[in-house]
Image: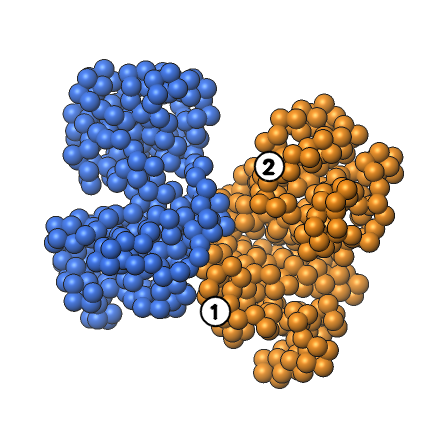
Chain colours: A blue, B orange
Amino acid sequence: MQIPTPYLIFLGNAPDDLAAKTGQGIVDWRPEHCLGQLRLAHCRADLGIPDCTLAEAATAGARTLVIGTVSPGGDLPGEWLPVLKEALDLGMNVASGMHVALRSFDVLVEAAASQATQLFDLRHSDAAYPTGNGLPRSGRRLLTVGTDCGVGKKYTALALHRAMRAAGFNADFRATGQTGILISGSGIPIDAIVADFVSGATEALTPANQPDHWDVIEGQGSLFHPSFAGVSLGLLHGSQPDAYVVCHEPTRTTLRNVSAPVPSIDEVIEATTSLGRLTNPKIQCVGISANTQALGTSEAAEYLRELRERYRRPACDPMRDGVGDMLEQIKRDY
Amino acid sequence: MQIPTPYLIFLGNAPDDLAAKTGQGIVDWRPEHCLGQLRLAHCRADLGIPDCTLAEAATAGARTLVIGTVSPGGDLPGEWLPVLKEALDLGMNVASGMHVALRSFDVLVEAAASQATQLFDLRHSDAAYPTGNGLPRSGRRLLTVGTDCGVGKKYTALALHRAMRAAGFNADFRATGQTGILISGSGIPIDAIVADFVSGATEALTPANQPDHWDVIEGQGSLFHPSFAGVSLGLLHGSQPDAYVVCHEPTRTTLRNVSAPVPSIDEVIEATTSLGRLTNPKIQCVGISANTQALGTSEAAEYLRELRERYRRPACDPMRDGVGDMLEQIKRDY
């Protein structure tokens, strides 16, 4: 799957910037792919890129209209249908990470067929993957793992990938979730795969490569999250990472959407190394990435200093100070 | 999902008894549900139950024709279609654990619709489940886990369930795979569920119950199998078992279909207890079930004796000597 760029980002009537998180992620990481935004009359989100109509976007060469907002209840609002149909009629593809499939709407399927444009339903995978085989592959791999969901695994992987490329590394970002796929234009929505094929799909996403090539893989869930630990383990085994980074949010006390406590960073390191050895005996933790958004500047600096001391590994907040220390560690170790 | 009984077991042209494993499993555990077998001209398998035609089975009250064989390559042989259609026309449902869906054949969908009979595609789950929440539920649960796939998890769970019922326990067998579902008439094909919902589906399969009620849950895969460990972990977390039994095949050296070594029983106990604590802090191993089919009688007895001594827990081969010791252990502990 490869989603053609540039994008027109559709925000519908998103009530605030948080509802436009997907669109914001794309603008943050791939501004060069974002031709503009399309907002309906009551939209209160703003990605800070030019507003344009469907016709203007098509004329300017937009290849795909990307739904960059979440809709209330996960449904596709009826008023979006004419917009999406017009985009298809104008020759654009449409991409969506929503639970409801674009292809469940006949009007969209017909419009896409008549223009030979594509519907990308990122939460619905039709591709058939083999089951994982666990065999060693050439090339190097780095996986971001987390103490919880939503602690910065995607952003950490993207920041590491950007820094590695800037430093001359031969590296690819490998997306495993809807937003990551929209950012990078390709990937596999790992949590939409039938359970038996998660590790096999991950092996397909991160195939054998040149010995010095790095796959920087977006992690999902947490080995300690009762909803998603199985997905995290399949992803860990399929990734067979040489290196991993633990992502953490220091002010959170219970796991997202459940009542279980957030595990310690130590527990995550111990479990990841121990379980990851099954498919890569040399797996090691190369750093800790903390999302310190909730802390003040000096508090965050002090917290990161404590992490460095305690774990004797690089610790950083990629959004505050970049990932330079982690990159140095990777250069030293590999 | 509840598959109506009694069954007519369809074996097609199964070349040998091994190809009729699914049918054999049903006959072994639920002979009272098996009205007869239907074999095509070149079938070389025999379940030891009466042969009957479709018309005879229908007259005798068969409610569901069950495909009890695997087909070469997983496809549905063309010559089966008229047989399945006739069964539907005669008012029987049709159940299949094959990868190819019955409902992908228009002729079957139409025949089922015209008779108001059902197509049961056991590898294809349409049901929507929530993500797991990990909250404690009332009632007790026992899960069978394995050092590998195909080491007797289903048979051990069935044997324990039968022994518990015979001893007056309030217990249900909970099927998580195709054959288990056909044996018990209901269940959830856990490996056909989208990865994000494995633990949630397991919670739905083993809901809150009376405090003395036991769910005896069929395990899947192994925490040490690189293809399926994620499924095993989702099932472990969703089951939140109080007790588990480790299933093992002593002569196997590499895991099924991959080249990784079989883990030790110690490793499986350590990982299962450690990971299982996330949703049930009181999880414990109540026994070891060895499939000693490949050993002679005295060799098997000696091996089981060694297991008992080494692990200080009951160890048995359910197919040789039953599960009496394990049941005594459960009575003592709960």
Q: Is residue B306 visible?
A: yes
Q: Residue at x 27, y 57 (%)?
A: A139
Say if labels 1 and 2 share a chain.
yes
In the image: residue A211, left or right of residue A204: left
What is the quadrant of residue B13 in the picture?
top right
Q: Residue at x 67, y 64 (%)?
A: B156
Give the percent coordinates (x, y) of residue A153: 29, 51
Mark 1 falls within which chain?
A: B
Between residue B213 and residue A109, name the one nearer to us: A109
Between residue A142 and residue B209, name the one nearer to us: A142
Classify B283 as above or below A64.
Answer: below
Mark 1, Cα crowd under 10 Å, few <14 / some 14-19 / many 20+, is some
Q: Residue at x 61, y 64 (%)?
A: B151
Tell me which amino acid carries mark 1: Pro
- Which residue bears the numbered disc 1? B261
- Which residue bears the numbered disc 2? B101
Q: Residue at x 68, y 56 (%)?
A: B18
Between residue A83 and residue A150, name the one nearer to us: A83
In the image: residue A24, left or right of residue A220: left
- Where disc 2 sits, the SS reads loop
Give the percent coordinates (x, y) of residue B123: 59, 43
Give the percent coordinates (x, y) of residue A325: 15, 61
Q: Is residue A163 visible?
A: no
Tell me which amino acid carries mark 2: Ala
> Which quadrant would the C terminus of chain B be assigned to in this image?
bottom right
In the image: residue A245, left or right of residue B25: left
Total labels drawn: 2
Give the percent coordinates (x, y) of residue B4: 75, 40
- Where disc 1 sits, the SS reads loop
